[in-house]
Image: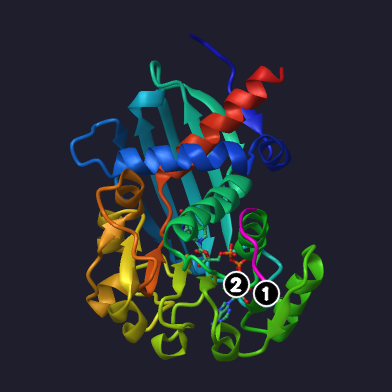
Amino acid sequence: MAEQTVFLSDDVVARFLRYDDLIPRLEEVMGKFSQSDSSDVVQPVRSAIPIHNHNGFLGMMPAYIAYDDTLCMKVLAYYSRKENSSLPSLKATVLLFNPEYGTITAIMDGTDITLKRTAAVSAISAKLLMPAQSDVLCIIGCGDQAVSHYEIFTQLFSFKEVRVCSRRLETAERFAAGVPGPVKVFSSAKEAVHGADIIITLTTSSEPVLFGEWVKPGAHVAAVGACRPDWRELDDVLIRDAVIYVDSRDGAALESGDIILSGAEVFAELGEVLNGTRPAFRNKTTVFKSLGMGIQDAVSAKLVFDKWKSSQ
Ligand SMILES: NC(=O)C1=CN([C@@H]2O[C@H](COP(=O)(O)OP(=O)(O)OC[C@H]3O[C@@H](n4cnc5c(N)ncnc54)[C@H](O)[C@@H]3O)[C@@H](O)[C@H]2O)C=CC1
Ligand SMILES: O=C([O-])C1=[NH+]CCC1
């Protein structure tokens, strides 16, 4: 019973967390989450407390996955940083428990888990919802999440063109110089998204950065930032005209400023599309509003721990 808690650094986590293992596990757990009659997956909406003095919040994300007997909790600290800050916006730590005794099996740095599982979930939304012929990908916001999103989107799909835009041109240029493939840098989001088939918003903005009148009809938008009830990344026109998919309806109703403040109706959870109980409207303009879920961290942490353990 008295196992020793192991500490896994971000390098170790990154070494054992691979997209090809992660994606099927995320699809499975999000599908189970969206089965209303299932108690296989337990996950409350994230609770958050403000860190007033430092312009941030602390979020707690517990989850229990009965079918895999995984008990986990991610704790994340998010900060609205100044553009020139050298500090990251997000620090996360993942606790993996022994579900029988309640002891802590592993404490992992949550950075790589958060980057990869978020990008993988956006890629799942794209697989289901982006137009069948998708040639142009546009990424708005060129921070840490942009790197993981670029990585998985260019691995899984073949785009003819990848465009990026950020609040400052230098940030987008630095991103373009750091990734392996060709990327077109834009100084204006309006120009960057013109004609794009898929747009990913990955900003720390609390005001809209993407407007419906710029978006090509039928495009798919994965909106990953704006995770508080009074923050926006999308304007009312886009969110009201699109078919809205979310990771969790309960999460969206409590945490997403884009949904709450626009009064938009959520059409489906991604898990419902995965289960085949709600359709994927590839021909319509779609938005996937991502907020992040504890169950996504839990399957990632279990995967990392199992791989690490079998390597010992
Ligand atoms: N849905 C989910 O599961 C998760 C969402 N997030 C969210 O993703 C977003 C990005 O996270 P990170 O990449 O870690 O942050 P970061 O701080 O590394 O990068 C943010 C980027 O947004 C850009 N930006 C800020 N305001 C902008 C504007 N008005 N127009 C264009 N670009 C702008 C910044 O220049 C920067 O390049 C954050 O909002 C974070 O909360 C992060 C983790 C999980
Ligand atoms: O799920 C997550 O880790 C986060 N969602 C928004 C900020 C971090």
Residue annotated with mark 2: 135
Measured along the vertical axis of the image, is residue 181 above or below residue 74?
A: below
Circle 2 — which element?
A: loop
Measured along the vertical axis of the image, is residue 8 above or below residue 283?
A: above
- Asked if the residue under mark 1 is in contact with the one under mark 2, i.e. CB atoms within 8 Å, the reply is yes
Query: Looking at this view, is 177 or 155 the one in front?
Result: 155
Measured along the vertical axis of the image, is residue 85 above or below residue 51?
A: below
Which residue is drawn at the image coordinates 48% and 53% (left, top)?
Answer: 124
Magenta segment: does it hold 93? no
| Horizontal relation, residue 1 to residue 19: left or right | left
Residue annotated with mark 1: 161
What is the distance, in whole Å, between disc 2 and disc 1 at their CAs? 6 Å
Residue numbers of the magenta segment: 156-160
Q: What kind of residue is marked 2? A: Asp
| Horizontal relation, residue 109 to residue 79: left or right | right
Q: Earlier in the sequence, mark 2 or mark 1?
A: 2
Picture coordinates of residue 300, whole percent (x, y): 53, 38
Which residue is drawn at the image coordinates 25% and 48% (left, top)?
Answer: 277
Q: Residues within 10 Å of mark 1 (few under 14, many from 20)?
A: some
